[in-house]
Amino acid sequence: MMEIEIKRLDAEALVANLDDLAEILQASVAAGASVNFVLPYSLDDSRTFWRERVLPSVKRGTRTLLVARLGDKVAGTVQLDLEMPPNQAHRCEVSKLLVHPDFRNRGIAKRLMVALESEARRLGKALVTLDTRTGDNAEPLYRGLGYLTAGVIPGFARAPEEERYDATTYMYKSL
């Protein structure tokens, strides 16, 4: 089995890995991930997201982008959003924990989250927050990593595959 390598990508590396990142996001949405997008969601839509939404904040230093590599393939990714209001500079937020469906159940998501927390500590953050669709496989992963539930909001987001509104669970972890 190939070793999982976690790397931080700067803006130049994001552009160099754009196709892999776009494929992971598009495949995740197609597999039902509730990460802000609805079907149909194309590779072009995904490339646009990475170029227009993620790249500028990585360039500004307000977002950290981590990827999990298996050999020469990017298999997963997670983002650490650092752009908080002045009264919340002590915290950061997890965004878009994604593992390509072909690479799931190999511990990649857990490794990405551990690396994300390490990066948050390195940056002096004391609190990490996130939200996840209630009942998704990610919820027990986060709980297992020590995240606590702050609350559940019913009907929070439209499901990617159909006209249904799902609850979201807000979670946090003190570092």
Image (tube, rainbow, N blue to C red):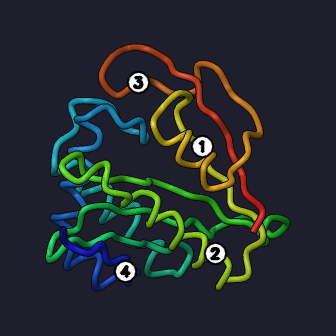
Of labels 2 and 4, earlier in sequence is 4
Q: Which residue occupies the foreground of this view, 51 or 168?
A: 168
Q: Which amino acid does label 2 sit on?
A: Ala
Quadrant position of residue 69: bottom left
Quadrant position of residue 91: bottom right
Residue 2 vertical position relative to residue 159 in the rendered view, above or below = below
| Residue located beneath label 1 in the image | 131
Q: Which mark is residue 159?
A: 3
Q: Residue furthest front?
A: 1
Q: Which mark is residue 7?
A: 4
Rendered residue at 43%/40% (across/down): 36
Of labels 3 and 2, earlier in sequence is 2
Q: In which quarter of the image is the N terminus?
A: bottom left
Q: Which residue occupies the foreground of this view, 69 or 123?
A: 69
Q: How far apart are marks 2 and 1 (CA)?
A: 17 Å
Q: What residue type is labelled 3?
A: Ala
Circle 4 or circle 3, nearest the eye = 4
Circle 4 or circle 1, nearest the eye = 4
Q: Which amino acid does label 1 sit on?
A: Asp
Q: What residue type is labelled 4?
A: Lys
Q: Which mark is residue 120?
A: 2
Rendered residue at 68%/45% (across/down): 171
Residue 151 location in percent, x, y? 75, 33
Residue 75 vertical position relative to residue 133 in the rendered view, above or below = below
Q: How far apart are marks 3 and 1 (CA)?
A: 15 Å
